Amino acid sequence: MSTVPLLRLENIHKRFGQVHAVKGVSMDVHKGEVVGLIGNNGAGKSTLIKTIIGVSPATSGKFYWDGEEVEIRSIKDSRALGIEAVYQEQAVFDQLSIVKNVFMGREIVKKVGPLRILDYRTMREIVAPLLQQMGLSVPSLDHEIRFCSGGERQGVAIARAMYFKARMVILDEPTNALSVEAQKKVLSFIEQLKDSGISVILISHNMGQVYSVVDRIVLISHGMKTLDVDKDDISRQEIEDLLADAAGEGGRRHVG
């Protein structure tokens, strides 16, 4: 693993008026590393992620990408670096086809005389082997994605990130409300991302799933980082105990 992290957060704060949602969080994510970002509801996990992707820019603090300080003030900024986010509720658009969902907002066009039109043939030729590589079998690339299973929908969203050569993928509760089989498929996708050298930040309330795929675990409680440890140095039960402590004690306990 490289000594220079792909992404470094240094003393990140986020305020919404009088509400101090993220309080001086510093953390690293290395190339090809899967980091589990955990915490109870309202802990600040999603807010922290929104600062990383520029949806809700940090109030103060610094971001470093490959060792260089960068500004992340918008989704355009984070995408330019190679950061893609997949949200459970916003991963895909139901009324669009599988092909359109992969290229959403970044469609391939071709010139026909003076006109520029969408090049569906090229997009299909790209998407078909990409889904095959991920082990996804769908009846038609032109089917509206609302007819796909939960696992297939997540797979299409992750395929989008892989095609656009994301260097880091942020997954926010990717297995929420999915069947057991679909959850297994999503965990397999995470392993494929790691095998491809893509870094992953995984937000999930399911400790069994987090523990099975991550390399490192970061615990956020009441906007503060209270744990940052290699998975091999802590047991699943110890993590669950820490989560229970944070919920029961209002996050006052500081670990590590």
Image (spheres, rainbow, N blue to C red):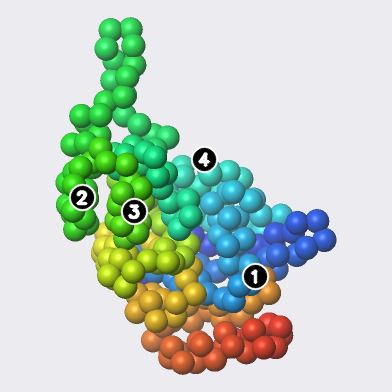
Mark 2 sits on what residue?
A: 138
Task: Report how far apart the C-alphas of labels 2 and 3 lie in the structure.
Answer: 10 Å
Q: Are the residues at dot 1 and dot 4 in contact (C-beta closer than 8 Å)?
A: no
| Foreground disc of the pair 4, 2 | 2
Whole-percent x, y for residue 56 in the image: 63, 51
Mark seen at residue 153 = 3
Number of marks in picture? 4
Name the N-terminal-most of marks 1 and 4. Answer: 1
Q: Secondary structure at mark 2?
A: loop
Q: Earlier in the sequence, mark 2 or mark 3?
A: 2
Give the left or right position of residue 229, taking residue 124 as reference: right
| x, y percent for residue 235 | 43, 91
Q: Residue at x 61, y 80 (%)?
A: 226
Q: Is residue 11 left or right of residue 65?
A: right
The residues tagged by marks 1 and 3 sit, at their Cα atoms, a distance apart of 26 Å
**N-term-proximal mark, 2 vs 1:** 1
Of callouts 4 and 3, the N-terminal one: 4
Along the line of sight, the residue nearer the viewer: 27 or 203:
203
- What is the spatial separation of the Cα atoms under label 4 and label 2, in whole angstroms? 31 Å
Discs 1/3, front: 3
In the image, residue 238 sits, relative to residue 92, either above or below, namely below
Instruction: Give the foreground label among 2 and 1.
Output: 2
Which residue appears at 18% of the width and 53% of the height? 137
Amino acid type of disc 3? Answer: Arg
Q: Which residue is mark 4?
A: 76
Residue 141 to residue 227: above or below: above
Q: Looking at the picture, how far across and down is residue 59, in whole percent?
A: 71, 55
Residue type pointed to by label 2: Val
Along the line of sight, the residue nearer the viewer: 246 or 183? 183
Q: Which residue is mark 1?
A: 42
Compared to residue 108, the image places residue 248 above or below, namely: below
Relative side of 125 to 178, left or right: left
